[in-house]
Amino acid sequence: MQKQTKSRRTRASVGPPAAPAAPQVDPGGAGPVATDKSLAFLSRLATEFTAVLSLPDLLEHIMRVLREETGFDSCTLALIDERSPEVLIVKAASGLREGFRGLAIPKDQGLHGVVMRTGEPLFVPDMHADSRVYRRDTRIRSGIYVPLSVRRRQIGVLSAHRERVGAFTMADLDVLTVVGRYLTGAVEVARLHDQLKDLAATDSLTGLANRRCFFERFTNEIARSRRKDRPVTVVLLDLNGFKAVNDAHGHAKGDEVLIWVGEAISKAIRSYDLAARFGGDEFILMLPETTKEQAAQVLNRLHSVEVPGAATNLSFSWGIAVFPVDGEDPERLLQVADHRLYSMKERFYDGETPA
């Protein structure tokens, strides 16, 4: 015998999306909710989900369409921040709360916190009279909230608001709940797509960008720098004496060294720079809007790399090339950087310390 499930008005079902409830009259004056219009809207959403894979684009598009089709004054979507799971980040917003995009909300506070904790839809007739509201907005008087859940794990909250008290019906909440279920699936698909793209662009050992990803970004950055008449610097890096580490300690130790080197490089550069593994013990850096002198300051922080368990620190040789002074295209810039790296490498093996 199947267990009797709770009403959708108090708990979001974990089964397949159901059709919105029959039309109801809004006691606050919003008028009837047309079932056929709701179904047409959900059909349009299903089509949109299959056509858009970029998560930011998808979320912004859905928030706009949701507001246009339902007449809600505002729609927002907040998702758990993967880097800081204790907060929700408003990833998309439309209408009155469009300016809330990027807002961080503690996961356990406010109306979002209630929904995250209970996993239940929430109906709020008067936002100003509810003490649980995290951030009050004088323009917003009523709201509805539904959870986004994946395998009973809450990943975010979808909400809608209106300017009048009591402006939502339970039918509105039903529609938002169904949209939330579709949206949850779309978010997971888009995230998986982004993860696969990241894996395809990442070196499996060091976690840095791989060679293909670097050239795509470098080509785009040169085009941007050409438009803005700004420099961009490329640096080829090579570990000195790395072969000796492999010969003395084996390739497992060599891989460990490369991982530590990748971490050291990531810490030395800025957030908008790009580091990649070029091959073997060679690495490459792209430093936007950076002169040769400024690049040297970055490289001084990489003069040597301290590797735990190694008898001595490892040092780098490098070659620098700057767009547009040393070349106008990636191939020419890499030729110049490689030539300068080779010259510095020769000085190292002649007994000179790289400077």
Image (cartoon, rainbow, N blue to C red):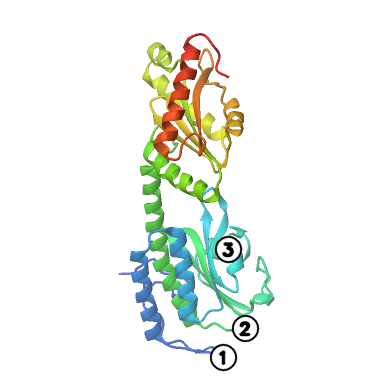
Q: Is residue 73 placed above or below 282 in the rendered structure?
A: below
Residue located 45% across and 40% down the image = 328
Residue located 40% across and 45% down the image = 198
Residue 105, image x, y percentages: 61, 59
- Residue holding disc 3: 101
- Residue holding disc 2: 164
| Residue kind at label 3, given as amino acid type | Arg
Toward the viewer: 350 or 118? Answer: 350
| Residue kind at label 2, given as amino acid type | Arg
Toward the viewer: 97 or 185? Answer: 97
Identify the element where label 2 is drawn. Answer: loop
Residue 35, image x, y percentages: 39, 85
Q: Is residue 207 placed above or below 131 in the rendered structure?
A: above
Toward the viewer: 240 or 339? Answer: 339
| Whether residue 152 can be seen here | no
Q: Is residue 82 left or right of residue 301?
A: left
